[in-house]
Image (spheres, grey):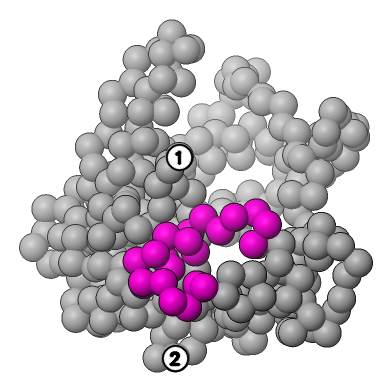
Amino acid sequence: MRARPEFFAWSVERQERYAVEIPKEDRACLNEALLAELFGRHYSTRADATAAADDLPLDERNIWNETCLPLYGIGEDCFFLNESFAEGESILDFETLRDFDEADHRFQESARQEDAQRRGEEYSPRPYRGSLYLSWARLFVDGRFTYSTLTMAAGYWYANSSAEELIQQRIPHRLVPGKNHGKVDGGGWQWDLRVEAEGEEGVLDELKRRVWAYQSARWDELQTAYDASDVGGVYLLHESEPPETNLHVVITNRAALSAVRFRSFLRDCRAIERPSSELFQILEKERAALADFVEEQHADITRTYNPKVIRLVRRPKIRVMKGVFDP
């Protein structure tokens, strides 16, 4: 009512179009009103209010997101996909998870191909088999405000494979700051950390290289297997950490992606829900196979490693923009 009182006389379609691209002046007005209503804080200018809204602590950010979700979200669950869209596009341009995911896949593969061409390298775009990986969303689950993560089943294994933990068990190591770590560089800070492994840095590098190659290959194999399977479905994993409510939505394949619409997200997921025990059984089997691989490769490298032979690796210079780690 403060920013755009005529909003409530508009059609649902017009309200949604407005909500995905709220004018800057209206957003500033909303920020000012919400800060006063929710937290009793008043600011001399709307610019100050907008700056304060962008810098809320986590507990207040949760309240803010819950309050705003009915405006920003769409459909039965007020679903909001917290991901980037192409210029001029929004969630309203996609009906299903697959519509969005496949368009994003094409964009990412095109960008990778262009990047390879600039470096004078060849790149063959990967086929689409579902590519959602730790995408963020917000929705109401049975009336309760919930944060959600969306991931393909093959990617869920990759994210939960415990590879770093297994490597750490074999070769204890830690990151230590280099001489340039934290130094101001342009508009940010330099990220200069090196690995310390009690003289086994070379063995560690080789083990990590082999494990990463294994994970990449296994991820691809699992994607292919899920894609070829007629077992399409969704696993709904409740991973809440109070005070937040979190739901991890794990999708098996393209058929399942096509079956889930943004406007009826939770209802469609529940219609094809599969028991989570099924996913965890596969995950434990894959973890055991990875543990065996790490053990075998560590033994092989220890037996054959020559410290005089150093693999040439390009070390990128990393600069972190100021404020990127602020809450």
Which residue is pictured at 47% across the width and 12% down the height? 118
Q: Is residue 304 left or right of residue 93?
A: right
Rendered residue at 60%/21% (across/down) = 313
Label 1: which secondary element: loop
Please report the bounds of the magenta region as a residue range: 6-26
Q: What label sits on residue 87 in the rendered view?
A: 1
| Residue 319 lies in quadrant | top right
Q: CA distance from mark 1 to mark 2?
A: 32 Å
Rendered residue at 60%/35% (across/down): 205
Q: Which SS class for mark 2?
A: loop
Task: Please rate how many residues cluster around mark 1, counting C-alpha atoms within 10 Å: few if below 14, some from 14 to 19, many from 20.
Answer: few
Please state which amino acid type lies under the numbered disc 1. Glu
In this view, the residue farthest toward the left is: 230
In this picture, is 133 found above or below 215?
below
Q: Is residue 12 inside the magenta stretch?
A: yes
Q: Position of residue 187 (x, y in %)?
A: 83, 33
User: Which of the two discs, 1 and 2, sits closer to the camera?
Assistant: 1
Label 2: how many residues lie within 10 Å, few (<14), some (14-19) or many (20+)?
A: few
> Is any atom of residue 42 visible in this view?
yes
- Residue 106 occupies which quadrant of the picture? top left
Helix, strand or loop: magenta stretch: helix
- Specify the label residue 143 is tagged with: 2
In the image, residue 202 lies at what x, y percent? 64, 32
Q: Position of residue 317 (x, y in %)?
A: 72, 26
The N terminus is located in which quarter? bottom right
Q: Report x, y in % for residue 77.
A: 38, 80
